[in-house]
Image: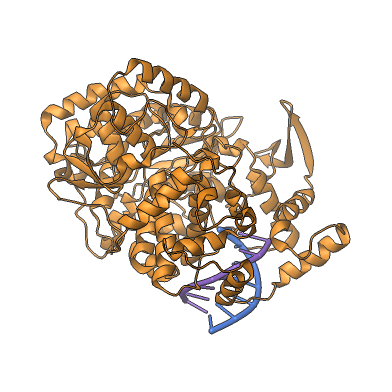
Chain colours: A orange, B purple, C blue
Amino acid sequence: MEVETLQDAEETKNGGNDFEENGSLDPVVYQLVRVEGDGTLVPPTEDEVLQIEQFLDDKVDLPSIDDVGNVEDFFTNDCMLLKEPDFEEGYSELETNGEIHTQQFDADLEVDRLKPSDDSLDIPSKCTVVHDHKPDTEQGDNNIVHQDNASTETPKSTVLNDSCSAEKEKTDACSRSVNNSSTGPSVSGVTSSVPDFSILRGEVCLDNLTIRELQEAFRATFGRETTVKDKLWLKRRITMGLTNSCDVQSSGCVVKDYKIVCKDAKYELPTIGGIPKAEVEATSLVRYQVLGPGNERDTPSCSYYRSEDQQRSSNRLKGVSTDNDESEGTLQDEQGAAKRLRKPTKRYIEELSDTETLDSTGKLSSPGKRVAHGEVLLRQRVTPLQEVDSLSITYPTRKDTFGGFSVHVPYASRMRRGRPRRNFISFLDDDPPVECPEVQMAVETMLGKDGEHVNHASSAVEVPLSKNAEKKGGHIETAEKKGGHIETADNKEIHSIEPEDICRTDAKTKTKRGLKRKHHRAWTLSEVLKLVDGVAQFGPGKWSEIRRLSFASYSYRTSVDLKDKWRNLLRASQTQLSPENDGVCPRKSNPSIIPIPPAILLRVKELAELQPQAGNLAAAIKFSGQSSKAAQGRGSSGFP
DNA sequence: CTTAGGG
DNA sequence: CCCTAAG
């Protein structure tokens, strides 16, 4: 089920939350259990709970999700959701409830959107008002249109699988340029591989755009093409993408510098706090999209780029007036001084000596280059107890016993950190034995004990920004306040092995760190947006502030997380927007990763350039990793 | 405890 | 994400 469909369902009904309002909600409680081969039921491990719990706080804001099929998938595996009263009806119940709940969490989205960033206010739990401004005529229209588009547009998988559909989309683009005779003034017939971000620059009323321009805007927004020719749909999608909200007006929205400004100025996206960004945009955009790195004027030598990307950034920081043609050494010294000096960590030292013995060719002088090497070493340490050859894929497995059965399970996914599978009946009957503190928290907040947090918790339903498209399980939320306890699951993950996990698992056992690794939570679009806005407000480095004010509702994001994510965003904005990559996912065009919308990356880039400029010059941002790669621009044969 | 950086 | 160093 796609988001817009759900949303429309809610729009037409507009009363999807009624049952929630009057509190007559049927307190159906789902419990997660594992079904064994003999039909016995076994309580979940903590891991499984965690997997499910993840969807508690994740909220859907991505344009496309696969739900229905996954729900079915979910039941084909060894986990299922049981309706507490009589789990025999679990299946049908889930389906109906699934719809209800999706509607509901759609409403929760609204809560989230309406929520002031400081999170200090109590938000009314219903937001039916939100949809009132939508003309009724449009609602019906939308319903039809959306269904239509769902089938005409490239399959949903393309949303999640950008690279694989690249070819197809290109052909689509070709045929489109033939079929579509509409003349877009600024959009050339040639579908360049680089999205035309300029379509969103300045003040553009989406209503005035042609279909093709809308498509281009869509592309600039989502980083992928679309063949949808429906204006309404396109406008809504673009607006949704730019506002990161499902609640958008179908018309009357004006794009102003990548952000949606509604005509009635009723709401406006959080802006980069008062910072004049127009000119920066102009320069940075042009440079990256059109000129490319190799075309910066005052940088004639190629070695300049190859040497340090931070130099480029520092130059950009200084604006157009890069009269600062200092030598590399000078710049590096400058930045080296700005950087906090730090002596190697113990672990690092250990690794150094370790690799020294293992591999004399290890470059001790350049620790940064040793990353790949280190990973290899880690992998080599994996010593699976057993290996089971299944379908030509060899998974490291270990033996485990489920209720008397001895089976092989993937090594990584069977870190049983949960309770033993005893006392199953009481598990169903008693209060949900919440072991994970996060789940505990979520449940508590949903129970309404903490009035301030109730809405936050229920509004924190979002689809991860990047998830494994091919093997994602269902995720339908059942967030209820009345003791409802949410279970969704990503079943397939149970059967798949993330190499990373193997490494981690092994590393943990090796190092005997009993500490539980924090449950991985993919960053969602809205989280990223919040982060970006936070940085815009408080500046980079004020992570605790950002966390307190912008991430009050996301208890699981620490300031370190924010910092890390920002670092990644910087890298992404560096890599993903560079002309060489043609906007394609850098990492082997990994299909499982939904690229961060270019619009957001642009903001990141702007901030990265703006902030240090405001502060001191030497505080240039250091880009690492791909920076040298990204900097190795090819020819200066610019773009049209 | 917070931030910065390397892993 | 984790870990550690430095404030």
Q: Can residue A585 be seen in this view?
A: no
For residue A187, above or below residue A465: above
Q: Can residue A501 be seen in this view?
A: yes
Quarter assignment of residue C1 = bottom right
For residue C1, above or below residue A148: below
How many labels, in total?
0
Across and down, in percent, residue A524 comes to: 42, 48
| Farthest-out residue, top | A179
Across and down, in percent, residue A77 comes to: 55, 31
Quarter assignment of residue A604 = bottom left
Residue at figure coordinates x 37%, y 23% from the top left: A153
Indicate the quadrant containing the C terminus of chain A: top left, top right, bottom left or bottom right: top left
Decide which of A603, A191 is in the foreground and name it.
Answer: A191
Across and down, in percent, residue A84 comes to: 39, 39
Decide which of A355, A424 is in the foreground and name it.
Answer: A355
Quarter assignment of residue A494 = top right
Indicate the quadrant containing the N terminus of chain A: top left, top right, bottom left or bottom right: top left
Across and down, in percent, residue A443 comes to: 38, 54
| Relative side of A482 to A618, left or right | left
| Relative side of A364 to A55, left or right | right
| Relative side of A158 to A231, left or right | right
Decide which of A418, A13 is in the foreground and name it.
Answer: A13
Residue at figure coordinates x 60%, y 29% from the top left: A38
